[in-house]
Image: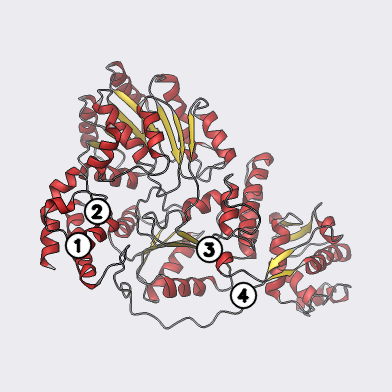
Amino acid sequence: MPHLQILQDVFGYPAFRGPQLEIIEHVINGGDALVLMPTGGGKSLCYQIPAIARQRAGLGMSIVISPLIALMHDQVGALHEAGVSAAFLNSTLTGEEAHQVEQRMLRGELTLLYAAPERVTTPRFLALLDSLRQRGQLSLFAIDEVHCVSQWGHDFRPEYRALTVLHERFPGVPRMALTATADALTRDDILERLQLQDARAFVSSFDRPNIRYTIVEKRDGTQQLLRFIEREHEGEAGIVYCQSRRKVEDIAQTLVDAGVHALPYHAGLDAKVRQANQNQFLREEGIVMVATIAFGMGIDKPDVRFVAHLDMPKNIEGYYQETGRAGRDGLPAHAWMGYGLQDVVNQRRMIDESPAAEEFKQGLRGKLDALLGLAEATDCRRVRLLAYFGEQLGEGGNYSCRNCDNCLNPPAIWDGTQAARKLLSTIYRIQQSSGMSFGAGHLMDIVRGKVTEKVSQHGHAALSTFGVGADLSEMQLRGVLRQLIAMGAVAVDAQAFNTLQLTDKSRAVLRAEVSVQLRESASSPSERKRKRSGAGAAAIRAPIALDGAALERYAALKAWRAEVARGHNLPAYVIFHDATLATIAQRAPHSLGDLQGISGIGAKKLEAYAQEVLRVVAEV
């Protein structure tokens, strides 16, 4: 098979994974495809190998459409390292540089060209493509991050809608649409918007078994995050997502003060600072990037060991996409999220205040409810997560993935139905007595029997439900209220200072027709461990077990790789992945033949780096 030879000779991998072979054969033969494959599943090979095979067959150049400048740069760099002719057209190029790329394109010197959707759909670029097509030299369109075309996707970009022109103008050129995240609604929208109804769909498992999912009730989110990093991921690369720019700055500084090598990233930073921080994160080890969701899509860094959310995302697609940036190398990684009542209220408010049509808002509420269900779940997180994407994991209701917090430490459950009825009854009596609505804090004070100035001012100590929940902690009651909001039995009025109101669904809870089962809140956290001495305190960790001598070789190889990467202005993993270096260190090769067959070493890299690798190994 020529495509297997390409995989081995160019990319240095011994065999295809999962559905890669089936996808690649389909596209090489000219078929359209929709590819859903999780982050780290080898999605890029699904279009890179067909592009190489079709170019070798005389069918011309392939166009990769991506919104991500960082991804373009790194993938083109990686292709050059593998001996493949590739280029990109984006805003980082000067006019002269862009002209030179266009000339190479017209001369047939490129195998792959990366470009953003807004460039691809310009009259000038379409004219260049027409010229190629007329000469039979336009081979394939690969549309990456294709969930951006859908209004239901978590990262909708209007410029993707214009890509329907590819079907209309170049009907004979195969198209493949690729994404790591799309529920059934988003998939249908993609197929319709891009007129890919006849495309063959390849849907891989969404499961990332190497990622451990942990979701905790947020009490002091910053301190909880610090404990998580210090105790489980000291000195390792990670991403921390926050909702606001201000919070990004504050959390990054707090981590730095605690001895963590952290950098901020958000759209409000100077573009040069933002790019420098991203480059440093990609090229150095052990950096924690604190960012808004403006950061991350298309980041290929394989050794991100954790992704943490200090604020709840909007939906499961966003959560899955963001957590999927951890453990791309297949090694153990962690997805950690803290959430609380205010997260629920904020997300509801943003939906309610949106100028979108009510039907669209309802769809967003449904997606948020699914994420809340995941957060409040007392059973396997992974089962819940995969079920959202239509995938069943295990049979029966007691499946354990053995790699999420609920499966590793099953939570104690308590029946919050009576507590829920007390909260709903109090909301009703407040409105009956004063004709007004109040927020969560005031509601808690009444139910727990606290005489505050506001309680006295409005005469709410006289309510029949005053103090009915004195035996419950505020944390317990907030958990119950979160659940009531999540199930739609309580509405948050964003126009009236986040006050709480009953809904049509309240009646079933008040009548005890619906039970409210909750996880018991964890005990108060212990004091955070003492401040560490700084980033890099952790010893070197290899992706496979290595003895002392092999670990020394591994460290020396990583230092050599860092020098080469700096010289090429590329992330270190583009030269060789950690797993490749670890295998070299384990085998301690003495000759060229000893290096052949190691995963990740293709023919071009063998030619370029073999002698240096052998020298480094021999000197340890």
Residue 431 position (above or below residue 527)? above
Q: Given the image, on which type of amino acid does mark 1 rest?
A: Leu
Q: Earlier in the sequence, mark 1 or mark 4?
A: 4
Residue placed under numbered mark 4 in the picture: 522
Q: Residue 263: image x %, image y %? A: 37, 64
Q: Earlier in the sequence, mark 3 or mark 1?
A: 3
Q: Evaluate whether residue 88 shows in this view.
A: no
Q: Earlier in the sequence, mark 4 or mark 2?
A: 4
- Classed neighbour count for the residue bearing mark 4: other residues with Cα under 10 Å, few (<14), some (14–19), many (≥20): few
SS of the residue under disc 3: loop
Q: Are marks 3 and 4 in contact (CB under 8 Å)?
A: no
Viewer-side label of 3, 4: 3
Number of numbered discs overlaid on the protein picture: 4
Taking 231 as reference, is 114 left or right?
A: left
Residue placed under numbered mark 2 in the picture: 576
SS of the residue under disc 4: loop
Give me the residue at 56% from left, 50% from top. 386
Residue placed under numbered mark 1 in the picture: 557
Q: Camera-side residue: 592 or 292?
A: 592
